[in-house]
Amino acid sequence: MTTTDTTASDVAAPAPGTQRSDRLAPGDGLIIALLMISAFVVLLNEMMLGVALPTLIADFGITPGTGQWVTTGYLLTLAVLIPATGFIMRRYHLRTIFLGALSLFTVGTAIAALAPGIEILLTGRIIQAAGTAVFVPLLMTTTMRLAPAARRGQLMALATAVPAVAPAVGPALSGVVLSGLSWRWLFIMMLPIAGGALTLGAAKLRNITTPEPVTLDVPSLLLSAVGFGALVYGLASIGEAAAGHAPIPPYLPIALGLAGVAAFVWRQIALQRGAGAFLDMRIFRTRAFTAPLLVMLIIALNGFGTLIVLPLVLTDVTGLSTFALGLFLVPGGAVISIVSALGGRVYDRLGPRPLAIPGAIIWTATFWLLARLDEGISVWTILAIYLVMTGAQALMWGPMTTAALASLPDQLHPHGSAAFGTIQQLAGAAGGAVLVSAYTIGANAPDAGALNLAQSVSASQAAFTTAGVLAIGAILGTLFVGKAAATHEASASHVPGTETIQP
């Protein structure tokens, strides 16, 4: 019997008289908690620098286009490296990956904190991103591996809340810090936390995996760099192009990126006959994985796009200050955490659909409510809608991720986690591009410069109407997700061709 067949029988038909434990093994809770804290720290830092861009422009005497690279360069590095995380998680021990990645992040953070100019700051950000790329896939894969089946929904809900909460908290914390301190403190305050996690990991973290003798496929790495890097760059530049500020037409890098991604996929299909694929394409052969993945694509697209457009709305329509804007975003993170924790318990009993379908409907409705905003709307009304939006998003984020990964056999979990990370990066870049473009077009402002109130309202309505149309796709997608988590697990080992991945 193959390893995969054993997994199937264990899931589908437990031996009579046996009872699955719902407790984590000794030490497993520490591993998951350490990965959650570390992932939260690195993702928090990813989202904090956008608010500091005006300060960086003033301090370094640079143009907005140059300053934007501290964020764009970070995202491009993630886009290039995340597809390779499946290979990294198969090739190295958990302890080695954690210590290496967090060390890179810490070194990059220190360089950024001390940067005398924009070039050194950008170098530090790229080193940070090189360490950040692996954390979310590593957290998801490790949680799926260690979580007892009876508590998988709860633990995965907490794990997936990390990348959902950090984008909401990051800009808020950044606004608070910048109201009284230098931008360098955005990096300085991360150093003791990262150092503490590094020390604890070195002392307590144990290896739970057996490395596979896979080799680095250099053509895959190059194709990943060209394909995903160019695609993210092109998508991120659509908004600039709509405003007439893009250095090159965005369709050129997008076309190059699509060609590179197609070549990357072709290369992975050829390599998966052995064991050297960066991203095993067999994860896409089952609807139980692809349907939640497509829903997550829409969630990430609208979610990250909203985090860019909403501050514009609050500033231009309601006149909110930078400090108040930071405070506005804080409750969203709390709502995500609470709803994720409660939703995980429901998932373990009923599966993903009772959470995801109502969540998708409510989530879509919030965008249509925001699409009807006018000059008289209050900050409190927008806050109420925003909190409902974040709660509904949390009802989908965890269940979709858990259902998708639970449909895969253990040996494909690293590839599934890498695919989720890659899709979220691409969707984040696309979401910002699409909604900012809709905002720019909706403003109908022939001249560059600040918008008046009427133009800001029109721009906001156009952006959220676009988001509402996209969100309808999430409703349709949740209808194709399996009814129960057990169904996914029962079919986990019947992905065609996986029997040869491990002897």
Image: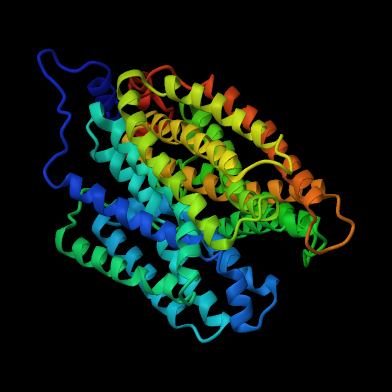
Q: How is the image coloured?
A: rainbow
In this view, the residue farthest toward the top is: 16
Seen at 44% across and 70% down, the residue is 186
The reply to whether residue 213 is in sight is: no
* Occupied quadrant, residue 164: top left
Q: At 46% across and 44% down in the image, what residue appears? A: 332
Q: Quadrant of the N terminus?
A: top left
Determine whether 269 is above or below 436 in the image.
Answer: above
Please, which residue is most extreme toward the right here? Answer: 446
Which quarter of the picture shows residue 450?
Answer: bottom right
Q: Check the image and report above or below for 151 versus 379.
A: above
Give percent across and percent down for residue 204: 15, 58
Foreground of the two, 480 or 453: 453
Horizontal and vertical percent position of residue 129: 46, 64
Q: Is residue 147 left or right of residue 86?
A: left
Question: In this image, 246 relative to 311: left or right?
Answer: right
On-image quarter of the C terminus: top left
Residue at position x 59%, y 82% in the image: 59
On the question of residue 398 being in view, the answer is: yes
At a point 78% along the width and 51% down the height, the residue shown is 453
Residue 393's spot in the image, x, y percent? 49, 35
Residue 491 placed where, x, y %?
A: 37, 21
Q: Nearer the viewer, residue 10 or 51?
A: 51
Residue 133 lies left or right of residue 38; in this view the side is right
Q: How many marks?
A: 0
Residue 39's quadrant in the figure?
bottom left
Please state if 446 lies on the left or on the right of 16 as rendered. right
